[in-house]
Structures are given as structure tokens and as C-alpha cells.
Image (tube, rainbow, N blue to C red):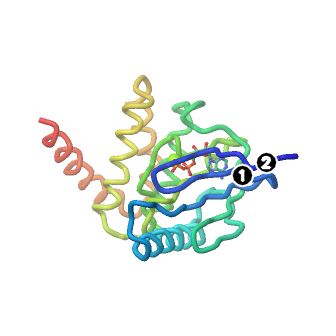
Amino acid sequence: MKKDVIIGRGAEATLYLTKDGVVRKVRHPKKYRLGVIDDNLRFSRTKREKKVYEKLSIPHPKLLGFGDDYLEIEYVDGDVLKDVFDVKYSKLIGEHVATMHDSGIVHGDLTTSNMILKDKTVFFIDFGLSFFSTKVEDKAVDLHLFYRALESKHHKEFEKAFKSFLEGYKKSENYDSVMNRFEIVEKRGRNKHK
Ligand SMILES: Nc1ncnc2c1ncn2[C@@H]1O[C@H](COP(=O)(O)OP(=O)(O)O)[C@@H](O)[C@H]1O
Ligand SMILES: [Mg+2]
């Protein structure tokens, strides 16, 4: 008989691939948190992630169901982009991030581990840290996360990849203001490490 298998275990949630071929993301109780507070946090984060899913206009797996502490998400049968990364996907990723930002969504954990490549489409996943914001600062920090992720995970192609990512991101209506803020975020980061 087929069984559910665990495909991810983060700080926030456990991901199962169910015997029906669906991804189930469960926020199990955390024993170190007080009961009421824990329920509130798990339920509100699940609800926010559900709302983000419902508003997304970039490629993403379909939200198939939900409960107080879980989401059921379509399984994307592809490769985690981190494992098959190529500079040629960077511009497309930049375009998608621009579309997402322009719709008022900040991802919160932009890395190539949270993207799945299938049939030349890049699907975005893991909206556990996502939130609604139109602030230039939040978008710049989102880009900076991706910049750092490329630098550490794809060091060889990093500069080319980020340049071509920005060519895609140019389509954002706030490109100039986000990039101005990006410079400030980058300086702030460097000073912290001095
Ligand atoms: N919808 C999905 N389709 C296919 N694989 C997925 C899907 N969602 C998650 N995964 C796999 O599970 C891993 C962990 O999921 P993710 O949502 O990134 O949670 P976390 O990073 O918090 O553990 C992903 O890197 C990916 O390999
Ligand atoms: Mg992840």
C-alpha cells in the first residue's frame, strides 16, 4: 500500500507527498509555545499563505484545499531549480518577481530552492514567509535575498545571473525606486559585517 512521504521539514511546517499525489503542508503544534498563542500563530500563518496563493498571478502550483493548520497544494513534477540552475532562466525569474511585486506580494524567501522547473516553466513555491506589501523597502529586501542566494548557491554564474534577473525585473512599474533602495539595503548589509 502506498504511504504519505515527508518531502520537507522546515522550522515552520512539514511537507508530505500524500498517497494521492498531493503536497500537504502542515503546521504542527510547537510544544515550546503556549497553547492559545501557538494555535493563533499556526492558523493565522496558514490563512495568510492561503490568501497569497489565491492572489498569485505568476506560475505556481494550484492550491487544492486547506484547513486551519494545513494547505493542500498541487505537486509539481519537475526539478528544484537549485539543482538544474542555468543563467538562461534568470531573466524569466526577474519578470515573474516583478509581476508578483507589482501585485503587492513580497515572497520573503526568494531562493532557487523555492522554485521548481518543469517544461521550461519556473514555478514559485514556499509562500510561508510571504506577505502583502507595496513598500519599496520590502521589495528591495526581497531582491537582496535573491541576490545573496545567487551569490552563495550559484557563485560561478552569480554576476551574469543577477544582471539578467534585473533585465527581467525592469518590467516592474517601480523598478527605479526599488533599485535605489536596493543600493541602500546592500550597503547596510555590508556595514553589518564589518
Ligand atoms: N508543490 C510542490 N511540488 C513539488 N515539490 C514540492 C512542492 N512543494 C514543496 N516541494 C518540495 O519540498 C521542498 C520543501 O518545500 P518548501 O515549501 O520549500 O518548504 P521548506 O523550505 O519550508 O521546507 C521543496 O524544496 C521541494 O523540493
Ligand atoms: Mg523552501
Q: Nearer the viewer, residue 136 or 91?
A: 136
Could you say which disc has been placed on residue 149 in the image?
none
Q: In the shown orientation, is residue 49 left or right of residue 117?
A: left
Residue 186, horizontal then vertical, whole percent: 23, 45
Q: Nearer the viewer, residue 75 or 95?
A: 75
Circle 2: element type: loop
Q: In the shown orientation, is residue 193 left or right of residue 76?
A: left
Residue 65, horizontal then vertical, whole percent: 70, 69
Crowding near pointer 2: few (<14 within 10 Å), some, many (20+)? few
Could you say which disc has been placed on residue 3 in the image?
2
Amino acid carrying label 2: it is Lys
- Which residue is depicted at the point 48% across and 68% down? 42
- Which residue is depicted at the point 88% across and 46% down? 1
Q: Choose top left, top right, bottom left or bottom right for residue 38.
A: bottom left
Residue 115, horizontal then vertical, whole percent: 57, 46
Q: Choose top left, top right, bottom left or bottom right for residue 27.
A: bottom right
- Which residue is depicted at the point 48% across and 48% down? 94
Circle 1: element type: loop
Q: CA distance from mark 2 to mark 1?
A: 16 Å
Q: Earlier in the sequence, mark 2 or mark 1?
A: 2
Circle 2/circle 1 CB separation < 8 Å? no
Quadrant showing the C terminus: top left
Disc 1 within 8 angstroms of ligand 1 (CB)? yes
Q: Nearer the viewer, residue 81 or 38?
A: 38
Q: What residue did someone put label 1 on?
A: 75
Which of labels 2 and 1 is toward the front?
2
- Position of 57 relative to 3 (above/below): below
Crowding near pointer 1: few (<14 within 10 Å), some, many (20+)? some
Outermost residue on the right side: it is 1
Amino acid carrying label 1: it is Tyr
Q: Nearer the viewer, residue 17 or 111?
A: 17
